[in-house]
Amino acid sequence: MAAYQISVPGPLTSREAGQMRELLKKQAARLEHSGFSCRWEEVGRGTRTVFHIHNREAGAKSEQGLRHSLGRAVADYYLAVNEPDLIHRIITREFQYRNPGESREIERYAYHLLDDSEAEEPSHRRRKYRIARQVARYFYNHRDLAVDGYFQFRMKRYRDILMKLVEHAIDEYLLDQEYREFIDLLRYFVSIQQPKVPLVHVIHTGIRRFRLLDGEGRPLQMKEVDHTVEELMDQVSSHEDLIVSTLLTVAPEQVVLHTRNPEENVVRTLMQVFEERMMICNGCSGCRHLRGREDGFAPEG
């Protein structure tokens, strides 16, 4: 039975050769554990490393097992070596983000999207399975595989998917940048404001549900919205923006936030904007009442 050949770019001492070497060892051990065996050797050929893999067993079942093992090795190689390099190239060459800090941030967004893209099963495992199956089918009719050429010419659809994913990651990155700049602007506005009232209680009664009370526990009486605040908040329109704009208009010296969900987005936004002016209540009698009912609240002293 003729040997299968897998070649990777780089000499025997290269990172690529070392990665494939370890993956083939792993798959050879897995084959032996299943009752089959193979032998393989590697040679340097110009600027490439070629791995020759021989099946030691006769029969269709062992041959099929070897093809699937090689598929898994190539899939692992792709996810460890080619995919990160491809994502980086798309970001820096296709979308021209060459600043190292920016490109690393966008890569982080891209991997987050990859991990979240298929919630029913870990995305990495699913991608590995699909690639391994495709490579095993290739080995059914072919004996030689150059991994870089294979990924370049036989996985164009996957490259297109990664291109769209990076585009989405860039959109997420830019949106977050805009959000951070907006938070910085609001934070600056808070820092230059003169307090108009000494204390405001923000009662977080449920998802996106708030009540504002003055220091005596009475519902806050709103006056006309400050024109500067109105101009600031024209940039966005969401529920959390309404809460922020109200507090900016009231300009309290201190804000006490009573909440059971400190990790909710709107709560994090309030903390970012008002910083040292805001504190989270650790559990007053009003908070205990809030846990039992959502239609009443009486902050302590």
Image (cartoon, rainbow, N blue to C red):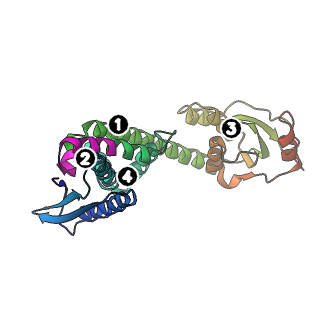
Residue designated by label 1: 164
Residue designated by label 3: 249
Q: Earlier in the sequence, mark 3 or mark 2?
A: 2
Circle 1/circle 2 CB separation < 8 Å: no
- Nearest the camera: 23 or 293? 23
Residue designated by label 2: 93
How far from the left and from the top, in percent, is residue 200?
Answer: 78, 44
At label 3, the amino acid type is: Thr
Q: Which residues are magenta?
A: 131-151
Q: Would you say the magenta stretch is mainly helix, strand or loop?
A: helix
At label 4, the amino acid type is: Glu
Q: CA distance from mark 4 to mark 2?
A: 13 Å
Q: Which mark is residue 33?
A: none
Q: CA distance from mark 1 to mark 4?
A: 18 Å
Circle 3/circle 2 CB separation < 8 Å: no
In the rendered image, residue 147 lying in the magenta stretch gets the answer: yes
Residue 283's place in the image compared with 217, above or below, is: below
